[in-house]
Amino acid sequence: MNMVQAINDALDIKMAEDKEVVVFGEDVGVEGGVFRVTENLQKKYGSDRCFDTPLAESGIIGAAVGMCAAGLRPVVEMQFSGFLYPAFNQIVSHAARFHNRSRGRYKMPMVIRMPYGGGINALEHHSESMEAFYGHTPGLKVLIPSTPYDAKGLLTTAIESDDTIIFMEPKRIYRAIKQEVPEEKISIPIGKSKVLNEGSDVTVIAYGALIREVQKAIVLAKQAGISVELIDLRTIYPLDKESIAKSVKKTGRIITVAEGPKSFGVGAEISALMNEHAFLHLEAPPKRVQGFDTIVPLPMGEHFYMISPEKIFYEIERTVKF
Amino acid sequence: MFKEFDPINNKIFRIINNKGAVINEKWKPKIDDAKLIKAYKDMLYVRTADQMAVSFQRQGRMFTYPPNYGQEAISQALSMVWRKDDWLVPAFRELGAWLAKGATMKEVFLYFMGYEDGTVFKNAQNILPISVPIASQLIHAVGLGYAMKYKKEDKVVYGIIGDGGTSHGDFHEALNFAAVWEVPVVFIIQNNQYAISLPLKKQTKSINLAVKGVAYNIPSIYVDGNDLFAMYAAIQFATDHSRAGKGPVLIEALTYRKGAHTTSDDPTKYRTKAEEEEWFKTDPIDRLKSYLKIKKLSKDINEEKLIEQYKKEVDRQFTEAENYPKYKLEDVFNYLYTDMPDDLRNQMVEHENFLKWKEVRK
């Protein structure tokens, strides 16, 4: 099963199990989504449970807020993460705050799904990785899977959560990785990272499509005699700082790898946390391998922006030799 | 015209029918024969270039492309009415208007090959870049309109949007601001009846899209967008109105997207062959051709020869685009700020160091 199928499967299972789950967005019904993630759901569950909306992202999220207040569990799709901004007000000013504002009277159990990230040769607004926005917004939880299995398990948990979840899907690997995924329901807890590779010289933290790139960098590092511990974050907020600190205390070095702009990003947060929680164990400054503080270039220039295995290895080597 | 065709009555403004016969003499604009023949040729050029763009994309030489197939009359009429220094605020499916403004196919190709340079349109006067976020550009048109009024510049601003965009808040904010400020903006909705897969009837319950302007007290009209004469007349009327300082106008141009949303899209998923065939009968170029035939103006037009000549020209521009200088690292950084922060410059230098390291390692 690839990631598109795994997400579809999680939606299918939750829609079958829970009548309060509704799925909507632009082109998600008849067409089954521009990436086919919601394919067949309308056929199977009817057009009152999986449906197309008029073209208005703010309308989609605002309506989901109302639905949540009435006890539904909307799973909405933003067609591309770069198209979300008209809905920013509804997310930041309402979805993320309603539970607090109403002192717990109204829960906001919505999931906002969206493909994100570069490397797919696309127009402007189709390539960005702005997860730090959402991690920075009080009231939101942010999940990013790196495999079909994790996508299914994390989305299931997200739909069952009573909080508003930003669920970002690395579209570059939507169909690139195939994996055995159980047919039955699986759940992965929010806030738990996963060690994908054990090592002793340096801890690398990554998530989403960049896990694959780090794994390629690990091969280069191994040839250079460097042992890398790789942690897949899986949840951007709340961060699994205990697991990261545990690893850093073992290796003494940390590199964060993320595609979003470097300044004020996920890597900056993790570096700050490790200064707070593992300072005395650090043998080198925490290093951030991130996107530039620029717009993701159009396809002809995008290769400069995208983080390659070589770039990760380059920073691994420099950090270990520090 | 706007009284007779009040969108509240849902009566479409049309001058020629699908067979090219004049059905509304009263409002038929006076366009001389030479101009009409040129209009036909221009539309043929746009269609040829557009179809070649689709096939270049299919060959993997561009990453995407939004076809204009079937919508050529709207841009064409606009380009026949505007003054060269009027403003154009594009969305992303008005190729004819870009070219008429002074953009080149080479630039269009560059953009869809993946160069930002392609949307600068540096030889076109008073045009904004292509805008991808739906409806957002319409408010820029209003801002331009305000500035024209403020600076007492005698220029009209044309803001383009699609049918899907009319569901966006930005569309309504633009209309409201424009009406309140009485700015010289002509809004043109290219209603091609689909927002990717969503048909118009699921986009809105309004009887047409022009009617949305009525509530904002903007003169609005529902026009057959595949009828060059009707579009010309409506845009001319709107332009005169706006240029005279009477405020904005809204034109809904009903058309049909004969192609896909972009080359990544497959319309067979959401519409039927029967529907397509019905709408293909309204094709704007066929209609103008029929009109020219009726008026015996078409005998000097050698279509095959023209297309052959256009193909050569487009090919030449495509070759130039393919031989465009390589994208440089500094192109990623240089334009984000007028005054680049040191930190950003350092990121560029760091990446250069990495690239040198990579080169040595090879």
Image: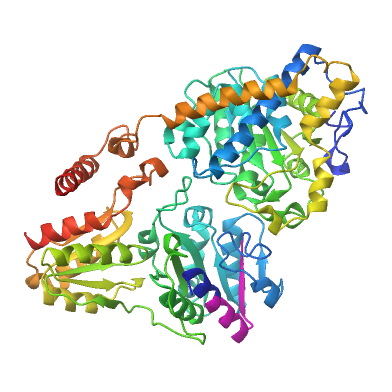
Q: Is residue A16 magenta?
A: yes
Q: Residue at x 43, y 76 (%)?
A: A179
| Vertical order, B85 against A219 (above or below) | above
Q: Is residue A202 visible?
A: yes
Locate residue B227: give its quadrant. top right
Is B324 situated above or below A168?
Answer: above
Quick check: A89 above or below A15? above
Q: Where A208 falls versus B213 (above or below)?
A: below
Tell me the quadrant of the picture where the C terminus of chain A can be found: bottom left
Residue in view at x 44 percent, y 59 percent: A116
- In magenta, the rendered stretch is A9-25
Q: Which residue is at a point 40% across and 53% down the rendered structure image?
A: A119
Front residue of this view, candidates B132 and B276: B276
Residue B97 in the image: state x and y as whole percent: 63, 28
Q: Position of residue B30 (x, y in %)?
A: 83, 16
Residues B160 and B4: in front is B160
Residue A108 shown left or right of residue A63 in the figure: left
Question: What colour scheme was applied to this rendering of the protein?
Answer: rainbow
Q: Is residue A118 magenta?
A: no
**Residue A31, image x and y in percent?**
65, 62
Q: Is residue B264 shown left or right of residue B249?
A: left
